[in-house]
Image: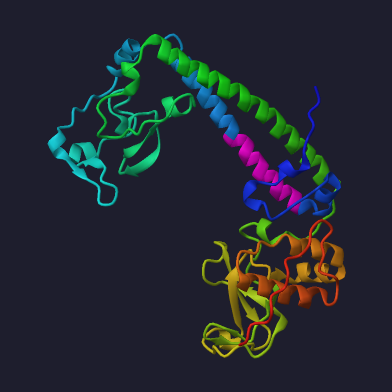
Amino acid sequence: MSLELKVEDVIPEYYDHISVASWDDLRFLGKQNITALMRAKQSAVHETQECVDTLRKYAALLNGRSGDDIAVMAKEYVDPKIPRGTFRLTRYFNHLEPTRRKDILREFDTTTFNNCGWCEHRGSGSYRHDYMIDGNCNLLAKADIRKEKSVGVASKGCLLRAMDADEIAALVNGYRTRRKALEERLRYERALVTKMCETADAASDKPFLPDLRPYDHFNIGDRVVGFIGRKKDGDLRYQMTGFLAGTVQDGYRHHDGCVTMKMDVPCHDNTEFFDGRGLSGGSRSPDMMLASEFGYLKKHPDFALEWLSSIEISSASERRDYHLLSKALLGDTAMTSRRRQFPPALPPKPF
């Protein structure tokens, strides 16, 4: 049976400011952007597959078991019997954790089905060294059939050992129910990836949307264009506004979320920063772009509108900067994208 694929499902939740309404809209974004979105979807497929594999493993582990069977399995591991007097309270959350050196140095998966701290099946929670201070049991949480109970290194024994065969059978049924739902989701997501691949093959090369730029988007020596929209930024006073050309330099956190540029002409009063020619910011900031991207956006205002509409705006200051950039890039072009209105402009802020 063929699946009805929804194009909006190609956009991860954390990119909800990027929108597509049709497969033609997705193709319009260009090959690089579709490929970036496809990689995010492939990562989600991998995570879902890992969860399916875990549920299959848990079902096989507990199928036909009872608490007594779990107790027998526990004999293959260490039962540390930590004296209550050797625990201390954590500084912030008042949880108990061990103080004996041999407990602190104990390794993961040595106390399975005996002590939750080093158990193979411990889940998310707070950790120190190699033990879980407080959190949940994956064997209970992954079944998704009962309210989770907090467990940790100071818990009194394994909760599964107190269960009868019917209670553990309910866990196994929970694993199978969840696995079936996730397998259907996997089928859908893999079909989405295939459709995205076909769409990317039919798309042309276009600049990355700012939020989809890879970590190594800017490289030392690249020709770039930076935008200055204000006369003043904190203590820094700019001598000009608008677009300036420059070159990428080896600076703070290069290829780690930031980019440093040396502009061709002085542009501010900080002479210690490349003699007043330095600009820096986030590598996904829309006011910094490769010279080739700037040239493409100027020549293709229809895509420039789409590029601008993808920018996330979370504050009044960002909205003001956004409109300055839009005006400089598009001139008097109407501030409407193909699918949604641009945010309203704010009145200019006095310098």
Q: Residue at x 59, y 71 (%)?
A: 281
Q: Is residue 232 shown left or right of residue 84?
A: right
Q: Position of residue 194 (x, y in %)?
A: 77, 36
Q: Quadrant of the N terminus?
A: top right
Task: Examine the structure image and report whether residue 275 is included in the region drawn in magenta.
Answer: no
Residue 40 drawn above or below residue 214: above
Q: Position of residue 151 (x, y in %)?
A: 33, 32
Left or right: 314 with respect to 298? Answer: left
Highlighted magenta segment, given as a residue range: 33-47
Q: In this orientation, which residue lies closer to the viewer: 272 or 118?
A: 118
Q: How many marks?
A: 0
- Would residue 201 be seen by someone viewing this image from the given angle? no
Position above or below: 66 against 35? above
Q: Position of residue 219 (x, y in %)?
A: 64, 66
In this rendering, would 113 be left or right of 240?
left
At x 30%, y 12%, the residue is 72
Principal SS element in the magenta part? helix
**Viewport quadrant of the C terminus:** bottom right
Task: Check the image and report above or below for 163 versus 181.
Answer: above
Please identify the quarter of the rendering in which residue 340 is found. Answer: bottom right
Q: Let me know if residue 88 appears in the view.
A: yes
Task: Determine which quarter of the picture holds residue 263.
Answer: bottom right
Colouring mode (rainbow / by chain / secondary structure / one colour): rainbow
| Residue 183 drawn at (x, y percent) | 64, 25
Q: Residue at x 65, y 83 (%)?
A: 230
Left or right of residue 3: residue 142: left
Seen from the viewer's position, the closer of residues 54 and 326 is: 326
Looking at the image, which residue is at 49% across and 27% down? Answer: 144
